[in-house]
Every structure is written in structure tokens, then in C-alpha cells.
Amino acid sequence: MKVTKKDLENVAVLSRLRVPEDEQETYIQQMDAILTYMDNLAEVDTENVKPTTYALPMSNVFREDEVKPSLDREAALSNAPLKDNGYFKVPKVLED
């Protein structure tokens, strides 16, 4: 087994979790299984495998831009808490 009780305690401290004494052995076994699986993945030959972001082929799912009617300016600003000269007014968030 690769994972020790000290490893579990260290992970618990870093993640700010409290692991009950009666569940520690279960977590140690689960963490060990995860690390063993990761070791198995590291041994897989990926030399000729093309890197991908998605497991399945993706296509562009964006729609075409179309001009459509929208709210007029006064309707859009009607519930704005602050407005000025036909624009939304917001507090300054960037410093000079």
C-alpha cells in the first residue's frame, strides 16, 4: 500500500477536513486505489495518440448572427438604478 495514515492526515489538514477515526482505513484504501490507477495510466503508451480536448469530435455549434428587434433604449433603462444620458451608470471599479 502506498498511502499511509500520515499521508491521509496531511491531505486532511491541507483540505481542512476532519476524517473520523473509524473511516480512516476506508479513505486510505480509496486513496491508494486512485494512485494505483494513476500509475497504471502513466504506463500506457501514448506516443502515437493525438492530443485532444474532447473525447468526441466537436463541430461549431454557434448560430449565424441575425439582426433582430431588441428593446428600445428607454425600456432597457427603465429599471436601472443609475442612468446618465441614455446609458447605464455603474460605480467605478478600476483605479487610475
Image: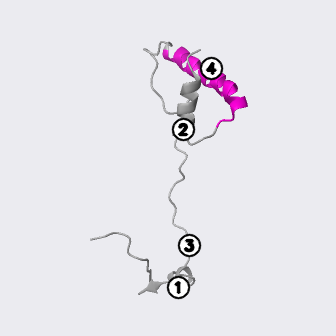
- Picture coordinates of residue 47, whole percent (x, y): 42, 14
Q: Nearer the viewer, residue 40 or 74?
A: 40
Quadrant containing the C terminus is bottom left
Which disc, if any, is residue 74?
1
Circle nearer the viewer, 1 or 3: 1
Circle nearer the viewer, 1 or 2: 2
User: Could you classify mark 1 by the number of other residues whose Cα lies within 10 Å: few (under 14), some (14-19), or many (20 or more)?
Assistant: few
Q: Residue at x 55, y 26 (%)?
A: 6
Q: Residue at x 50, y 58 (%)?
A: 65
Question: Over which residues does the magenta segment extend?
Answer: 19-42
Q: For the residues marked 1 and 4, what is the alpha-carbon distance in whole angstroms?
A: 61 Å
Whichever of labels 4 and 2 marks the residue nearer the N terminus, that label is 2
Q: For the residues marked 4 and 2, what is the alpha-carbon distance in whole angstroms?
A: 21 Å
Question: Label 1 is placed on what type of residue?
Answer: Glu
- Picture coordinates of residue 85, whole percent (x, y): 41, 87
Circle nearer the viewer, 3 or 4: 4
Furthest-bottom residue in view? Answer: 85
The answer to whether the residues at label 1 and label 3 have Cβ atoms under 8 Å apart is no
Q: Quadrant of residue 21?
A: top right
Q: Please, what secondary structure does the residue beneath circle 1 have? A: helix
Q: Residue at x 46, y 16 (%)?
A: 46
Q: What is the chief secondary structure element of the magenta stretch?
A: helix
Identify the residue position indicated by label 2 in the image.
13
Whichever of labels 1 and 3 marks the residue nearer the N terminus, that label is 3
Identify the residue position indicated by label 3 in the image.
69
- Picture coordinates of residue 60, whole percent (x, y): 52, 43
Whichever of labels 1 and 4 marks the residue nearer the N terminus, that label is 4
Q: For the residues marked 1 and 3, what is the alpha-carbon distance in whole angstroms?
A: 14 Å
